[in-house]
Amino acid sequence: MFSRQAARVLARNARLFSSSAPRQTKVAVLGASGGIGQPLSLLLKLDPLVSSLNLYDIRLAPGVAADVSHIDTPGEVNGYPADKLDDALDGVKVVVIPAGVPRKPGSDPSGPQTNASIVRDLASAVARVSPEAHVLVISNPVNSTVPIVASVFEKAGVFDPRRVFGVTTLDVVRAARFVSGIANVAPAQTPITVVGGHSGVTIVPLLSQNRYGKSLAGEAYEKLVHRIQFGGDEVVKAKDGAGSATLSMAYAGAKFANALLRGLNGEKGVVTPTFVKSDLYADKGVDFFASNVELGKNGVEKIYPVGPISPEEQKLLDAALPELKKNIEKGRAFAAQ
Ligand SMILES: NC(=O)c1ccc[n+]([C@@H]2O[C@H](COP(=O)([O-])OP(=O)(O)OC[C@H]3O[C@@H](n4cnc5c(N)ncnc54)[C@H](O)[C@@H]3O)[C@@H](O)[C@H]2O)c1
Ligand SMILES: O=C(O)C[C@H](O)C(=O)O
């Protein structure tokens, strides 16, 4: 016997997976053959809100697409090789960008310069072919690559701040998981809002806003904050030269894409942290910032302030802002070249 809740979930999934499901979207993944791109494409194929998946990469994309296309969910999948970027972007409503080079142990967490030009060139193509698309930037350094996308769009006269997102969901996923491990409760009970940016000290977890997070103090608190801020290093070290987080990132990317798709399809109350053009700290020269954002039919509907924070969190925020400012300026300067 199913519980009433399980029956409701099954009925909802049956509706969503039926070929007549009305609420669906065409999505492109740029960098679809990579460590993140492949599992992300797999997870997007499982999302009932994705009607069509265009997989693009400078290598292997038709093969990845052929493979993913055999999965028995309704969405259509097409692969596009290096010279078919424009075709991959034709008519898409959402573009997810995990293209780029991952970090090696010991390398600068602010990310390799190569990614800046990869993201700039992909953004130029989006601005030309699908200027109304929502762009989800995964490629690092997110604190700089998102301003690069914004600058490219501004130059092309198509920038809409409601449609450009830096994906910081992995920080949120890590924070929930780490706190749940410490408190010995399910991660659903430990949602943690993470604000700021996506590297090192710019990552500011608001532990005081969660019942379990709030109870941590002293060394335990400091260790946890450090682990959330430098979770990427943990994976880079463990992979020992073979790259950075890919599977947890694919999960986080698919989770954020699903939140956006639900908002675009008219669901109310979809709120999650993401790095967007934001006035919250513009007076400090920081015009991109991750905080809770309500996602709706046009993308960003409302940007929430950080809310009540502890004195420790205020210190973290004070340390994050100048670093964020530098990262944003670096991205802007690159795009202006
Ligand atoms: N936002 C986050 O939380 C987060 C988390 C993990 C990794 N990342 C970043 O994601 C990026 C990708 O990581 P990965 O582990 O998947 O790397 P990867 O090297 O495994 O894959 C990158 C893919 O991008 C492709 N690519 C390179 N240039 C391209 C171009 N011009 N157009 C299309 N595709 C292109 C490559 O062919 C490759 O398939 C890195 O910048 C990494 O730092 C971000
Ligand atoms: O740290 C990295 O280089 C990858 C990614 O940003 C992460 O948070 O794991």
Image (cartoon, rainbow, N blue to C red):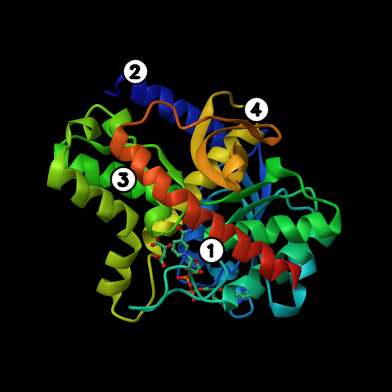
Separation (CA) of disc 2 from disc 3: 31 Å
Q: How many marks?
A: 4
**3 or 4: mark nearer the eye:** 3
Hey, what amino acid is under mark 4?
Gly
Residue placed under numbered mark 2 in the picture: 4
213 vs 162, left or right, is left
Label drawn at residue 175: 3
Residue placed under numbered mark 4 in the picture: 266
Separation (CA) of disc 3 from disc 4: 28 Å
At x 47% / y 26%, what residue is drawn? 11
Q: Nearer the viewer, residue 204 or 21?
A: 204
Separation (CA) of disc 1 from disc 4: 28 Å
Q: Mark 2 or mark 1: name the one nearer the start of the chain.
A: 2
SS at mark 3?
helix
Q: Nearer the viewer, residue 148 or 2?
A: 148
Quarter of the image that includes the N terminus: top left
Where 115 sits versus 184, above or below? below
Hey, what amino acid is under mark 3?
Ala
At x 42% / y 45%, what residue is drawn? 318
**Residue 183 x, y percent position in the rendering:** 15, 37
Label drawn at residue 68: 1
**2 or 3: mark nearer the eye:** 3
SS at mark 1?
helix
**3 or 1: mark nearer the eye:** 3
Where 191 sits versus 256, above or below? above
Q: Mark 1 or mark 4: name the one nearer the start of the chain.
A: 1
Q: Mark 2 or mark 3: name the one nearer the start of the chain.
A: 2
At x 69% / y 77%, what residue is drawn? 81
Separation (CA) of disc 2 from disc 1: 33 Å
SS at mark 2?
helix
